[in-house]
Image (spheres, grey):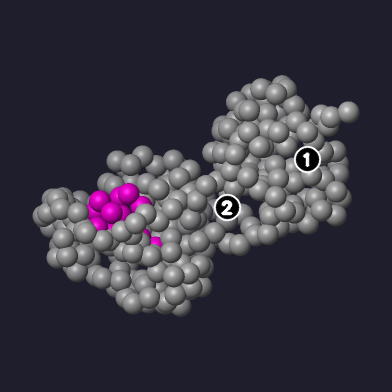
């Protein structure tokens, strides 16, 4: 179960073992992650939970390696249930989490904290603040020139980990913030009530569906950017500065999902960062070690006699 950067490495390693492998991805674009191989077949399409059982049986699947996105909870839970019912070996490859370093300010899981500082407060506190040479509102942000007022780093930028989007939206974290959402398109409708209480921007995938969902959630075209990851550090930083962002919301998606880069930029620019923790899933077995994945595949498809 692929579609992630890690699944590309897993598929490449399985191909070197000359083991037959079927890879599932949700979009045609994701197929470009994988190198052509006679041992591999790529299936494009959204595999709904109710389709998973007949799919595994029809394809005569002998083992499942779940390398789907950490937030693709529904399909993982269904795969766990089906593989258990039909006694199909299952292994979750879990990308490593980014660890909050000493000096980061972390709110407890589920804790509704105090309001974040405003953009002006962040600048006055010593973060990298920018004077604007234009004062024509959001529509003119693209034409604004930004110049650093101070190159000093904020001594302790706010990096807060929350347990869920519900906790985020029930708190006052977004109040009066210029907020960049890098959380995918599916969750954007839940932010619609905040459109009049904060200045919200979103980065989404460059697909018609993603942009349509964002527009219906109240995001205007000048507050949307459609990009496919990975995002370079230079482009990420330029986007935050272009939109004069004071708060970034992201998922705990690990280094491969850009979380580590966002932590670094937040500290460098003195911009607050809120990280939504991964949903809890009771995986029967999981690993972050590629060698263990390969051993699992070999033992399953070529069991010792």
Relative side of 55 to 156, left or right: right
Snapshot quadrant of residue 177: bottom left
Residue 260 is one of the magenta-drawn residues? no
Q: Is residue 225 above or below residue 136?
A: above
Q: Residue under label 1, please give it.
A: 63
- Residue 42 appears at what percent x and percent y? 69, 34
What residue lies at 48% left-to-right and 43% top-to-bottom? 256
- Identify which residue, 156 or 60, lies in the foreground: 156
Q: Residue under label 2, please give it.
A: 70
* Label whose residue precedes the other's in the sequence (1 or 2): 1
Q: Quadrant of the N terminus?
A: top right
Relative side of 65 to 162, left or right: right
Q: Quadrant of the C terminus?
A: top right
Q: Secondary structure at mark 2?
A: loop
Q: Is residue 124 above or below residue 102?
A: below
| Total numbered badges shown on the rendered structure | 2
Asked if residue 283 shows in the view, the reply is yes
Relative side of 149 to 81, left or right: left
- Residue 40 appears at what percent x and percent y? 71, 28
- Identify which residue, 130 or 93, lies in the foreground: 93
Q: Which residues are magenta?
A: 263-274
């Amino acid at each position: 179960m692929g579609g992630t950067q890690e699944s590309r490495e897993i598929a490449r390693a399985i191909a070197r073992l000359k083991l037959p492998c079927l890879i599932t991805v949700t979009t045609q674009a994701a197929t470009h992650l994988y190198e052509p191989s006679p041992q591999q077949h790529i299936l494009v399409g959204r595999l709904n939970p109710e389709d998973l059982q007949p799919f595994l049986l029809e394809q005569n699947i002998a083992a499942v390696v779940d390398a789907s996105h950490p937030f693709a909870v529904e399909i993982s839970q269904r795969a766990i249930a089906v593989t258990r019912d039909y006694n199909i070996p299952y292994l979750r490859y879990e990308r490593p989490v980014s660890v909050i370093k000493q000096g980061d300010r972390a709110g407890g899981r589920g804790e509704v904290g105090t309001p974040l500082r405003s953009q002006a407060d962040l600048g006055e506190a010593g973060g990298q603040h920018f004077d604007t040479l234009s004062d024509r509102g959001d529509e003119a942000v693209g034409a604004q020139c930004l110049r650093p007022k101070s190159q000093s780093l904020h001594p302790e930028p706010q990096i807060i980990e929350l347990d869920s989007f519900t906790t985020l939206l029930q708190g006052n974290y977004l109040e009066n913030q210029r907020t960049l959402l890098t959380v995918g398109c599916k969750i954007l409708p839940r932010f619609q009530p905040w459109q009049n209480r904060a200045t919200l921007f979103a980065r989404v995938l460059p697909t018609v569906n993603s942009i349509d969902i964002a527009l219906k959630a109240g995001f205007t075209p000048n507050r949307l950017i459609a990009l496919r990851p990975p995002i370079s550090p230079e482009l990420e930083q330029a986007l935050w500065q272009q939109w004069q962002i004071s708060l970034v919301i992201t998922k705990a998606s690990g280094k491969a999902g850009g979380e580590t880069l966002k932590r670094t930029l937040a500290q460098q620019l003195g911009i607050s960062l809120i990280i939504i923790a991964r949903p809890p899933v009771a995986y029967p077995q999981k690993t972050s070690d590629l060698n263990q994945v390969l051993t699992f595949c070999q033992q399953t498809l070529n069991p010792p006699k």
